[in-house]
Image: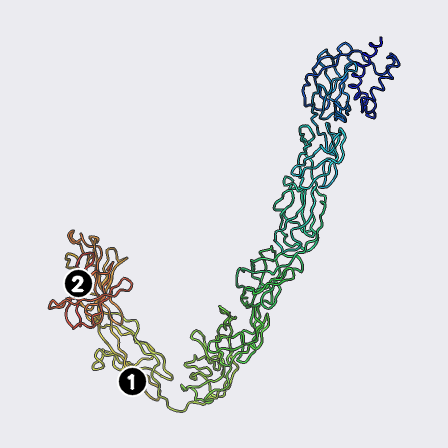
Amino acid sequence: MFYGHIFSTLRFFKALSQYSGFVAKMMNNSLRIAHFTTVLMLSIKFCSSAFSVNTPYRFYSAVLPTLVSITPSNSHVGDTVKIKGSGFNAINSSANRVFFVNSWLVQPPNGFEYDSIQAEILSVTDTTILAVVPIGAIYGDISVSVNEEYATFTNRLIYNIIPTIGSFIPDTGYLGDTITITGTGFDTGHPMFNHVWFTNGNNTSAISVTPTSIQVIVPSGATNGPVTVFTNTPRVTSTFNFHILPSITFLSRESGIVGEQITIFGSGFDPDQAALYQLTFNGTPAVITSIHSTGMETRVPVRASSGPVRLLYNNSEVKGSGKYFWVVPTTPIISEITPESGTIGTPVVIHGSGFDQAGPPLTVTFGGDAIAEIDSYTGTTIYTKVPPGAYRGTIKITSGGRSSENGPFFRVVETILDMKPSNAHVGDTIVVTGSGFATFPSDYYTIKFPNTTINPIAVTNTTLTFVVPSSASSSFVPVIPSLGHNINLPRMNIIPVITRIEPDTVIAGRQTEIFIRGSGIRSSFQDIFEVVFPNNVQRRISDKTDTSFVTTVPQLVTNGTVPVFVRLNDLSSLAINLTILPDTFPYTPKHPEFLYPSSITTTSFTCTWTKCYRALGYILDVSPDNFRTFLPGFKSLVLTDTSKMISGLEPGTNYVFRLRPYSNTDTAAYSFTVLVKTIPLAPVAAPAIAVDGGFICSWSPVKGAESYWIDVSDNSFDTFISGETTETSIGVAIIGMAPQSLKYRVRALTNWGSSDYSNIVSIILTDAGRESVKKAVMLYPNPSNEYVHISGLQVAPSETLVIDASGKIIPVTLSEADNIFSLNIRALPDGMFILQMVINQKTIQLKFIKK
């Protein structure tokens, strides 16, 4: 009996030593069986009670359960695992217990002490237990008890709990914020074994852990993305992202100019959400050029002013926003203006930089500090117009309180609107109105009149004042020379002024010259300038100077003192008196001012002359031999008209005529002699003499011809070559391929005119002659004493020489102008010569005479 109790006690000691962990766990982990002696004391107590049925620790078998494997060995909380072994109680499933050991407090052989969590058992066989991984289980051993017999350390099985991540509370935050990661499988026994990795962030450890949560601080460098948790088991990464809220830490610089690149440093910037960011410089929107997780690039926007830099994300201001930035104004630079000149109001485009800055308003000034109205502008372009009051000078831009330097020169083109009065006397003050005048000293401008130059007496932006100079006269356009151009003023008409008449007394009806002196009386060829006598009797002037002109008193002017004035076009002077005495003296008429032939034909011409003062008639003489004889009826022929036709004359013949006017008291002497020549008859062209490479045109001579003009054509004289000669024949050379049919005609020439054309002669070239002909070549005039000309050459001869009558060769050089080649023959003696030319390997010879 005693040995039986001893044996039972020993069995109990062994079972109890294995059960101590379970007892401790069942007492909410407050009881830890630390030493075997303690167990022995308790066993004595239990033995003394003779192993009562009510004893809480009962043992029914001395067989210990054995563990073989656990499948799977890595699972999540809530998963079902299969534990294989032996010694399991399939009859009474409640006698089986499964514990997940999280940590050993005391390990054998010193004792059994551990922290564990009991799992729910789903089913039991003799060799298999299906259990559910409990919440709070982590990496550790599996402990199984059957009828309070334990299998743990002696045949331990290692088990891993794979953690899970359920959520982030909150799911957004700044760097340094504390967040809670919910899930399962976190290591509460060893908090320091729980590690968290944020995307791109530093590795961080948990600050507190429960089986279902981890508190952690968002580390520096973290960006949007999933979060990974490490324990003593395999890692787990969230399938959803933690979002880092953007924040600004500092700006790359605290000041800069418009357009300068600025980097905004911070954290939590998301390149994939660029559209949700809004950046402003003191309220002026800025463009974000690039974004990365720790910064963004931008440029100081145009028209930005000094103030806070603010960043909104999804319409909410980010942390650290509002840092102050000072916009440094830059000096505007003008690179180009278009155009470089123009009148007031001309649109002007200014190119450059620094135009679009905050601060004082943008201003544009032209020469004279005239402020222009700005139509529109950007940082590099301004659209404006030349303002009123501007004149030539530099353009200046002021932007952001700074002004451009050494601006481009703009020439304001003066515009003339009006000039009053436009009809003025010498000495009158004239006011020109317009725009763009430079208000420099008055001698800056000069005004050009036809025969003098003056300076204005006053200049404003819109007016220019000058005095009509004493030499001004007639009608003209004053000109103001300006920089690079001339300004034409409106046309000015000078009203003539008479100061005196010399002599102031004349004889009525007598052709007396008078001098009328004054100002504004000079006229141009186109002007109508007249002296007006009583009864509107007008007399054109015959001579004029700056201050006087000469005329004659008409016969119809009555006796007495009469008013006389001058009229320039439609402008009249004030009248001045002229005394006219009766004519009681004899008068010899003067010769006519003009005496000339007109309407010359082959058999007639007309004698024409101007009327003579107080002449009652005229005596005409016409002679064929310088007044040795006279034409019948034309010796001392008395006429009252101022012309006479003479007919029945010989063609090409010289005639002379003269004239004497007479009055009631006297007859003038003969006038000078006038020579006239009738037109010659047309020549009669003879058939051409055709030769290989050319032909000779000939015609009959006509009386009075001084030379002849010949035309050669291959059509109906729409196109031709022509030449002049004093001979009655001319040689024509042919070069290259020519048409089979040619024509020529001739006219007789004099200094008085030319005859009609001769008959037309046609030339039919032979085939042999046409093989190398293309165009006629003519030499003229022939004879000549200075030059002979060669027309019709297509190219310059490759060789040119002259051969005299003795066969001597004289090298010469041709000159060329307008496709006509010329040969200077002044140095040649008189006689006949041959001009020989080689063109396209063909020799051409033309005869000419020097005399």
Instruction: Determine whether the residue tagged by mark 1 lies in a helix, strand or loop.
Output: loop
Q: Nearer the viewer, residue 622 or 413?
A: 413
Mark 1 touching mark 2, by CB under 8 A?
no
Residue 651 at least partly seen: no
Q: Nearer the viewer, residue 697 or 470?
A: 470
Is 452 drawn above or below residue 240 in the view shown? Answer: below
Q: Residue furthest top?
A: 1
Q: Residue furthest left?
A: 806
Q: Residue furthest bottom?
A: 585
Label 1 Cα neighbours within 10 Å, binned few <14 / some 14-19 / many ≥20: some
Q: Position of residue 456 (x, y in %)?
A: 55, 76
Residue under pointer 2? 836
Q: Amino acid at mark 1?
A: Tyr
- For marks 1 and 2, give the CA distance: 56 Å
Q: Position of residue 346 (x, y in %)?
A: 56, 61
User: What count of labels does the image hold?
Assistant: 2
Looking at the image, is mark 1 or mark 2 nearer the viewer? Answer: 2
Instruction: Determine whether the residue tagged by mark 2 lies in a helix, strand or loop.
Output: strand
Residue under pointer 1? 670
In the displayed structure image, the side of residue 610 where residue 142 appears, left or right = right
Tag of residue 314: none
In the displayed structure image, the side of residue 301 where residue 721 appears, left or right = left
Label 2 Cα neighbours within 10 Å, binned few <14 / some 14-19 / many ≥20: many
Residue 9 at least partly seen: yes
Which is nearer the N-term, disc 1 or disc 2? 1
Q: Amino acid at mark 2?
A: Gln
Q: Position of residue 364 (x, y in %)?
A: 61, 62
Q: Position of residue 686 (x, y in %)?
A: 16, 61
In the displayed structure image, the side of residue 630 where residue 73 appears, left or right = right
Q: Quadrant of the C terminus?
A: bottom left
